[in-house]
Amino acid sequence: MKLRSKDILGLDHLEPDEITLILDMARDMKKIVQSNMKRVNYLQGRSVVTLFYENSTRTRVSFELAAKYMGAHAVNVSVSTSSVAKGESLIDTGKTLDVMGTDIVIMRHSQPGAPHLLARNINASVINGGDGMHEHPTQALLDMFTMREAKGGFEGLKVAIIGDIMHSRVARSNMIGLGKMGAKVCIFAPTTLIPPGIEKMGCTICQSLEEAIDGADVVMGLRIQKERLKKALIPSTEEYARFFGVDVRHLAGAKKDVLVMHPGPVNRGVEMTSLLIDSDQSKITEQVTNGVAVRMALLYLLAGREEN
Amino acid sequence: MKLLIKNGTIITGDRTEANKDILIEDGKICRIGEGITDTADQVIDANGLAVIPGLVDAHCHLRDPGYEYKEDIRTGTMSAAKGGFTSVACMPNTNPVIDNESIVRTVIAKARREAVINVYPIGAITKGQQGAELAEMGSMKVAGIVAVSDDGKPVMQASVMKKALIYAAGFGLTVISHCEDLDLAEGGSMNEGETCTRLGLHGIPSAAEDVMVAREIILSEYTGMPVHIAHVSTKGAVELIRQAKKRGVPVTAETCPHYFTLTEKACEGYDTNTKMNPPLRTQEDVDAVIQGLSDGAIDIIATDHAPHHFDEKNVEFELAANGIVGFETALPLALTYLVKPGILTLNQVVSKMSAMPARILKIDKGDIRVGADADLAIVNLEEEYVINPDEFLSKSKNSPFKGFKVSGRVKYTICGGKIVYQDK
């Protein structure tokens, strides 16, 4: 089986059998990441470019290592040093990379839909490394990988996502992907950070932290950004922490083997307490390892699409 | 120069007369009857075709001066003529802004040289459309404007709008208000709601329109001066206008074809040709706009023809320019989406696209009668076709209606007794 599209734009575009294929492949890749010989030649002769219009450390490094572990040429394009700063259009930048022989472009962009625009206009595969508030498919896939690894599957899982749902591409991608795989997503957030119509994406809006976490298999926190204060969405991070911050004591109603997750970077003491972040239930560092494995799987599967 | 139109069905806002001949001489309709046998320089056989008053558009952007790479007076009016329009009122958000007598005269002079139909400039409400000081409305009226508007931008200060209504009325000018509370809109790029949330775009709540419509109605009621609400797109706005009319507030309103044909769902896939301001709304809003057209809460259909260059649309959704071209799709969309399902009669659509906008602009257009200017469109109401923007005469092709199957094709457009468009 192969991926149907040349691009990974979002969970919206992936069918359940494709998600399973990616997660199965990532299981094998994880062995390479954890071995002492992190070098295979699956992508030998291929070139991968990370094109990041927004700052990122973990996603960009994760992709770069994933490409390098498999023998690809990996190049980073950062906005400040490129012609983007000179006002070149996204399509022109993409076409330039295309004709240099790039096989896969990984792009992060503040504009929702930007990877879709790029993908329509270039021959190389495009992986969405996060587009505005829209989707962050590789993060959701690594989250799903982490859940499946610990829980064995998705059917009937309850995943509680707590935090800034409105601005979170991670929440959107997880909702779509988990919904497709048979899990149930419950959300809890300050009412100003619940975007209108979000329930139509298949989640349940909870009225309290207790309700969201009750019987949960996974509790996922989301980063809250200080800029939300200026937009009059929340009054202070202190008030946020008081009513929406998750602590070990909140896990009382959750499943015994509940997983605590966060896409990072975490504001300790705001979204989650340090006690929780560093607890045995926490999968937050494991998620990072899995991120490399999932990205290796995606690069491998995209590169292999053309071959027979 | 004599032109004779034979055996057409005359359809105006208030009457239908089958099998009529219309004799045109020196740009005027000089006789309407049956079996006219006068010799004419040209005879058009309109058998099986509808002869309607040349359409009047109260809201379009000709982009001239300043943005001729999007459209100019020549191509804009050719595009309008192809759509059956013979009179268009163009918005002042040009470069420079049409905010003084000299620019009005420049536009009118250029239109006299290059336009194929009648062009009526709309002047700005405030200098530079900055929303602060009133533009010289009186002098612009002398030069030929038919209304004032800061379209594209709202007049955010209520005190300025209040005084604009009063001052404009003193010169017999109607204020056309672009209703958008910028604070509530927060720089969004599509309707706030389910689709927007799914696409991760910044939303514009329908409340941003409703709040401003409510303000204009209150100011109009308070001052007793007329206001015309541009491009109504929300259920809330329709209801506010309906209630205001019941109270006798001198408010009129327009909507555009995209607000009774498309919903926010069209934005899925980030097609920038579905991006306009106000944005496409929900099915509930579309239903309310249709109801408003039907019960008279909404007086007229305008195009909001807003041409943009391909490069301005071939970008990220939130960075793309707002607006779509509309001249060449307005009539067929109204016929297909309003007349065909029986929501409006043919006469009502013709009225809302000719006589009524002419009344709002206070121009003597929109009727077929002896002595009137010979501004006519001859339409095959039955002809079905698929919309193809590549065939547009407009310089710009930014339309979300590509591939839509419609019925009703303009065969001839006659302006001042001259054939200005003929379908091949």
Image (cartoon, rainbow, N blue to C red):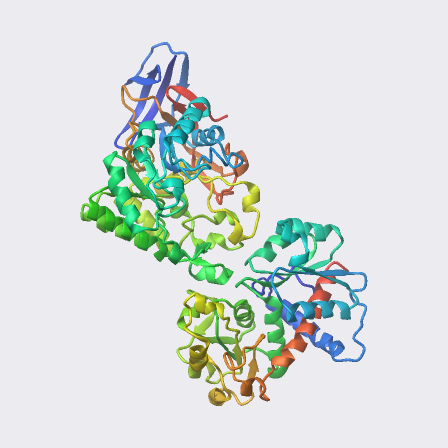
Please, is residue B274 above or below residue A16 in the view?
above
Q: Is A164 on the left-hand or right-hand side of B57?
A: right
Residue occupying the point 39% across, 29% down: B102
Please, is residue A10 above or below residue B265 in the view?
below
Count of number-bearing discs: 0
Q: Position of residue B251 (x, y in %)?
A: 25, 44
Q: Is residue A157 visible?
A: no
Image quadrant in which the N terminus of chain B is located:
top left
Q: Position of residue A152 (x, y in %)?
A: 61, 82
Q: Is B209 on the left-hand or right-hand side of A201?
A: left
Q: Is B8 on the left-hand or right-hand side of A282?
A: left
Q: Tell me where residue A126 sits by quadrant.
A: bottom right
Please, is residue A117 above or below residue B362 in the view?
below
Q: Position of residue B71 (x, y in %)?
A: 50, 34
Q: Tell me where residue A212 sits by quadrant.
A: bottom left
Please, is residue B70 above or below residue A26 in the view?
above
Q: Is A189 on the left-hand or right-hand side of B9?
A: right
Looking at the image, which residue sits at the far top? B39
Q: Is residue A249 visible?
A: yes
Looking at the image, which residue sits at the far front? B133
Most foreground residue, B119 or A267: A267
Q: Position of residue B14 (x, y in %)?
A: 25, 32
